[in-house]
Amino acid sequence: MTSGTPAASGTPAAEPVPTAAPVSVAPPTIADVAREAAVSKTTASDALRGHGRVSGPTRRAVLDAAERLGYAPNRSARSLRTSVTETIALHIPEFLTSAEYYMSFVFGVAEQAARAGLNVTLLSSGHLPDRRGTVPQVDGLVLCDPVAEDPVVEQLMSSGLPVVTAERYVGDRRPTGVIWSDHDASMTELLDHVYKCGARRPAFVASDTTGDWALTLQRTYARWSAERGLPELAGKAPFGSTPDVLQGVVRQLLATTPEIDAIVCAADGAAAAVLPELRSSGRKVGDDLLLASCVDSSAMRTAEPPITAVDLRPRTMGAECARLLCEILSGETPRGTVRDLPIELNIRASTCP
């Protein structure tokens, strides 16, 4: 029997069974999301875009419905139809970009923006958005600890876009919203703590930046010292200084005033960076000299001894800034809103003799 010859029994060869064509499932539309959330298409669209006057519960119901259905808006088409870019910009001062605080803050902004369906673009100091000074094409801005002398900050604050700042802005213009922490209270608590532990000549290594955080710490240290009749023993270092520079500031303080019995460092990482200088000067941290930081970080927790520090909660700060901006863009929260982010002092062996 040759190939292709029917079987000898004479039974006809079976016809091939046709396979069913694959069913094409159309992606969910805005109408599907509206039905799922039991709202109108307009309300669903406003909630997803973060615009219009949509209540918080309604917006959350729409976002939940979109997530359940796997709805993915066509961002390019939407941007062509409207002025909404579904992008916010985040500005970080140059002096913060090398700090651990910066990375945590950025992650907080990005995570919260993603929950709201927004993209994030970064703007750094030292470079205007473009040579003509054109405002970036975004829906709103988050500025981290803005400095008034920064030309980028001045331009962004004058852009007409909604602006939420992490910490208050000390310039002339008012942001659209603010998330801030009470650094006067936290610095007072820190200084009271080292005083209670026996320090009577606490020195302060300040940051030379002119943002609200740095200026508040300097004012608080001066006030606290005056109230107790103690001398101001302060030195300054540029934010982001190398360990050599920071150690030099501490070396000068100790040479000028050997009776210093506590050092409080403002900048992120500075307290851990000066430990070698303190050891080489014969001082025992946590015993005859107390050491503390105004910014907590992994360097404070892993130092030997671990260093007392203020937890500024940078990831939460970033998330709360993005949340407030989204609420202002949607009309859920009024412009001019100011919110307080609680921070706390973590006491460790460096101040507990």
Image (cartoon, rainbow, N blue to C red):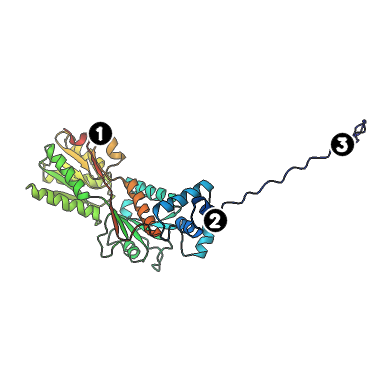
Q: Which residue is drawn at 35% across and 63% down?
A: 156
- Label 3 sits on a secondary structure element that is loop
x then y, percent, for residue 5: 91, 35
- Earlier residue among tags 2 and 3: 3
Figure check: 284 above or below 254 = above
Q: Residue furthest left?
A: 229
Q: Is residue 72 visible?
A: no
Label 2 – label 3 distance at C-alpha: 51 Å
Label 1 – label 3 distance at C-alpha: 85 Å
Q: Is residue 21 visible?
A: yes
Could you tell me which quadrant the N terminus lies in? top right
- Label 1 sits on a secondary structure element that is loop
Which residue type does callout 1 highlight? Glu
Q: Which of 296 and 85 is in front in this view?
A: 85
- Label 2 sits on a secondary structure element that is helix
The part of the image, by quadrant, that contains residue 77 is bottom right
Q: Nearer the viewer, residue 26 or 252?
A: 26
Q: In this view, does 276 lie to the left or right of 79?
A: left
Which residue type does callout 3 highlight? Ala
Q: Which residue is drawn at 21% across and 33% down?
A: 349
* Location of mark 2 (residue): 31
Which residue type does callout 2 highlight? Ala
Q: Nearer the viewer, mark 2 or mark 3?
A: 2
Could you tell me which quadrant the C terminus lies in? top left
x then y, percent, for residue 294: 23, 45
Q: Which mark is residue 304?
A: 1
- Other residues around mark 2 within 10 Å, as few (<14) / some (14–19) / many (≥20): some
* Location of mark 3 (residue): 13
Figure check: 284 above or below 235 = above
